[in-house]
């Protein structure tokens, strides 16, 4: 359920690349506790906005605030420590480690073990309970000791979400979480996102409009780097400008 309080806001967000304006004067307000989608046709600026919000790009102008704190010039690692964590469009797991070990690696940083290489394996074993909890949350507990390379693509994406949850984010940003998936995996990951959003905020860039319609409380439609429309899926899908720019071609 959404609240009135924004957890993340962007004001006048603009990004230029050598004279090309990729994002122009974008204003966003992400309600705490919501699932918020960024959609739009190819070249609309979704990925650039996503990279700006997650601090992988610096804006040419504009401001970004997270829980009231100005993070416009804050480094990605620092905003992750504040609770704003992103996933990537391409699955980013260690293929030759087991599913359990992937999550154990992710847990070392928030638990202060990331650089303590002298620690014994027994100390790292204390991470197992939490790792197994996270894997149970993403329906991967039966794959604990399977190398990540041997699980399906959809389950790799679930594993990646588990590793991001290891950082205990308040705001989770997902870059095309359904990309490249079949129907069964899409249904599984959609159910997972709905479940993990019960106690955190989710922002997602997503092309699958059925997923957006089913999951998202609010949708921002981008076109040519600007906000074209915003509202519920029903509201934006009924907007003639949106249908012309994006949804009309999607359903043609």
Image (cartoon, rainbow, N blue to C red):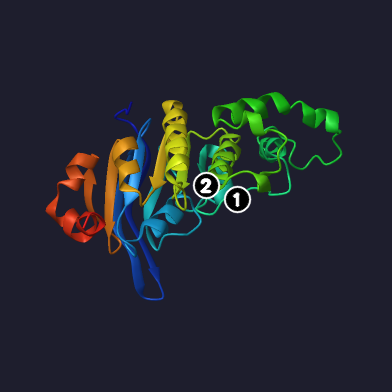
> In the figure, residue 101 lies in which quadrant?
top right
Where residue 217 sits, quadrant-wise, is top left
Q: Is residue 133 left or right of residue 236?
A: right
Horizontal and vertical percent position of residue 216: 32, 38
Q: Residues within 10 Å of mark 2 (few under 14, many from 20)?
A: many
Q: Quadrant of the C terminus?
A: bottom left
Q: Position of residue 181 (x, y in %)?
A: 46, 48
Rendered residue at 40%/42% (across/down): 203
Q: Nearer the viewer, residue 207 or 30?
A: 207
Look at mark 2 in the image and give the residue it sits on. Answer: 87
Q: State left or right for residue 170 relative to residue 146.
A: left
**Residue 99 on image: x %, y %:** 68, 38
82 sits left or right of 219 in the view: right
* Image quarter of the N terminus: top left
Confirm or deny contact between disc 1 and disc 2 (CB under 8 A): yes
Please give the name of the residue rendered at 38% of the width and 68% of the height, measured from the top-left corner: 16
Q: Residue furthest left?
A: 240
Residue at 37%, 32% (x, y): give it: 32
Label 1 CA crowd tier, 10 Å (few <14, some 14–19, many 20+): some
Circle 2 SS class:
loop
Picture coordinates of residue 134, whole percent (x, y):
60, 29
Question: What residue did someone put label 1 on?
Answer: 92
Quarter assignment of residue 235 = top left
* Residue drawn at 31 percent across, 47 percent down: 209
Q: Secondary structure at mark 1?
A: loop
Q: Is residue 193 above or below residue 26?
A: above
Question: Where residue 200 is drawn, which disc sits there?
Answer: none
Q: CA distance from mark 1 to mark 2?
A: 8 Å
Q: Earlier in the sequence, mark 1 or mark 2?
A: 2
Foreground mark, 1 or 2, reads 1
């Amino acid at each position: 359920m959404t609240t009135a309080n924004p957890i993340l806001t962007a004001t006048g967000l603009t990004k230029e690349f050598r004279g090309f304006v990729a994002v122009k004067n974008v204003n966003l307000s992400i309600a705490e506790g919501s699932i918020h989608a960024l959609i739009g046709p190819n070249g609309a600026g979704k990925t650039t906005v996503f990279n700006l919000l997650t601090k992988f790009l610096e804006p040419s102008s504009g401001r970004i605030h997270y829980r009231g704190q100005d993070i416009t010039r804050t480094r990605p690692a620092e905003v992750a420590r504040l609770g704003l964590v992103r996933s990537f469009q391409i699955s980013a797991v260690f293929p030759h480690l087991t599913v359990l070990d992937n999550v154990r690696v992710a847990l070392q940083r928030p638990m202060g073990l990331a650089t303590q290489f002298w620690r014994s394996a027994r100390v790292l074993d204390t991470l197992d309970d939490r790792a197994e909890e996270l894997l149970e949350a993403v329906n991967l507990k039966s794959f604990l000791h399977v190398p990540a390379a041997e699980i399906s693509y959809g389950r790799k994406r679930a594993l990646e979400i588990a590793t991001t949850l290891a950082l205990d984010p308040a705001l989770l940003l997902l870059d095309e979480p359904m990309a490249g998936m079949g129907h069964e995996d899409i249904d599984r990951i959609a159910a997972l996102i709905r479940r993990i959003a019960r106690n955190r905020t989710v922002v997602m860039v997503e092309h699958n409009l059925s997923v957006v319609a089913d999951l998202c409380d609010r949708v921002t439609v981008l076109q040519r780097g600007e906000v074209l429309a915003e509202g519920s899926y029903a509201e934006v899908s009924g907007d003639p400008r949106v249908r012309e720019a994006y949804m009309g071609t999607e359903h043609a």
